[in-house]
Amino acid sequence: MEVVCPIDTQFAHQISFLLEPPSPLQVQEYFDELITSKQCDGIQVKPTNNYGKGVYADMDFEEGGLVLKDQMLVGMQHSSNKIDCLVCGCCFCFIGSTEIQIGRKLFLQGLGSPKDVCFNEKLESLMHEKLELPYSKKFPLPGVINCPGGCKEVYYCSKSCAQTDWDFCHSLLCTGEGSSNKALSKFIQHANETNDIFLLAAKAISCTILKYRKLKAACDNETDKEKNHLSDLLGDHSFGLLLKAWNPLLMGYKRRWWDCVALPDDVDVSDEDSFRMQIRLLAFESLELLKAAILDEECLPLFSLEIYGHLIGMFELNNLDLVVASPVEDYFLYINDLPEAEKKEIDEITQPFLDALGEDYSACCQGTAFFPLQSCMNHSCCPNAKAFKRDEDRDGQATIIACKPIKKGEEVTISYIDEDLELEERQALLADYGFICKCPRCVNGEV
Ligand SMILES: C[S@@+](CC[C@H](N)C(=O)[O-])C[C@H]1O[C@@H](n2cnc3c(N)ncnc32)[C@H](O)[C@@H]1O
């Protein structure tokens, strides 16, 4: 079936601006400002000789040194992980208490299955913090703050995280009482049933719309003289503001999702065209649902299939897994390390919960996020840095650590794959990322 999105043709000119790779000057201005504002002093982003932009060391790093803590631009917890972990919808730290984490997970997992009534009652008591587990106070978590819009989909660790997320994107995506938005629920359901990356694309579009509205409101307060100056500069005043709001996303390396997504192992090469067409159709279906939910007439180019496809492709090619370790694991490890006599006594209370959780007791928060600086890091099969969470890294930020000494001026590289694999396997995996690796190890044909 042919997919036709009228916005693609109607706004072709504006869309080409939104998708044009940024000039070296734009790159430099954006990243210099970002690096200064986030105090990531040790690095620079600049053009490489071979493949677009890259990250360079602006100081010497020792092996094990922290190269970068990068705050995500947009991120999400996977829908399938929401039963396992209750985390802040803004910074992704665990919230509530050990009791809430354990009780909620077991309760939600057990929904619908007839279980021991007495055990179910205990779970409810845990969830509502009426039952306190021994030593749980040693693992304090921030309290649970409700979404200001009253939806029961997202919770936060603080009022400030709730407000930040509300202002950033959630005010458009909230399904709470105030929003009579059945269409939004349909969009979310479709994403949960097909591919939850659509939820991240919706966040990216929402944050651009909200930023555009803020810029516009600020402009409306400016004098006519200042406004005319801006309009002259940008030709179309409103589109100039939309471009400005889009700027952080403009910086990400992009290709269309259905062109760059790897062909799954179970799809024959002869069926590749039809597979890519199906992916395009799926994106179109999702976009139509999103349009029905949050369309903004002043930001129509954002609702084109071209933009939607490129955004998802950008996530596909750049995103890092969002992983936050579970405090429940720490709790049970602590109980396990208690002196034998005490452990025996405590185990009587905690062991039934541990048994019910099974091997999955330490499930961490899992999601995906786009990090503006980390996403500029190129791949090498002999990398000098790696994404690595230290004990203190308990939120959704990306942590990049030097895995060998890095000298000032050297490019900082990470491996997108398991670099211990042999040449052929590495090349096959990197082909899924849409490029042929030109790192020194591959160029020299080293296994
Ligand atoms: C996450 S982005 C890295 C930043 C990118 N160079 C840019 O300009 O934004 C990944 C893309 O960079 C390019 N790339 C990264 N590492 C490479 C390598 N070792 N060899 C060839 N191309 C590479 C590929 O086009 C890849 O899809």
Image (cartoon, rainbow, N blue to C red):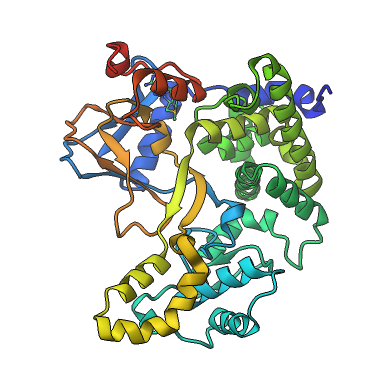
Position of residue 78 in the picture relative to residue 99 (left or right): right
Is 437 on the left-hand or right-hand side of 194? left
- Residue 33: image quadrant is top left
Q: Residue furthest top?
A: 444
176 up-or-down from 193: above or below = below
Who is closer to the viewer here, 398 or 250? 398
Q: Residue at x 63, y 56 (%)?
A: 170
Residue 360: in sight, yes or no? yes
Identify the residue at image location x=35%, y=27%. 421
**Residue at 59% across, 62% down:** 83
Is 214 left, or right, of 66 in this rendering? right
Query: Residue drawn 75% across and 38% down?
Result: 287
Q: Nearer the viewer, residue 275 or 269?
A: 269
In the rendered structure, the answer to whether residue 369 lies left or right of residue 219 reads left
Whole-percent x, y for residue 338 in the image = 27, 78
What percent of the width, then of the height, locates residue 177?
Answer: 76, 68
Tell me if residue 270 comes above or below residue 203 in the rendering. Answer: above
Question: For residue 224, which quarter of the picture?
Answer: top right
From the viewer's perspective, is residue 31 above or below residue 351? above
Report x, y in % for residue 266.
Answer: 63, 27
State which image quarter holds ligand 1. top left
On-image quarter of the N terminus: top right
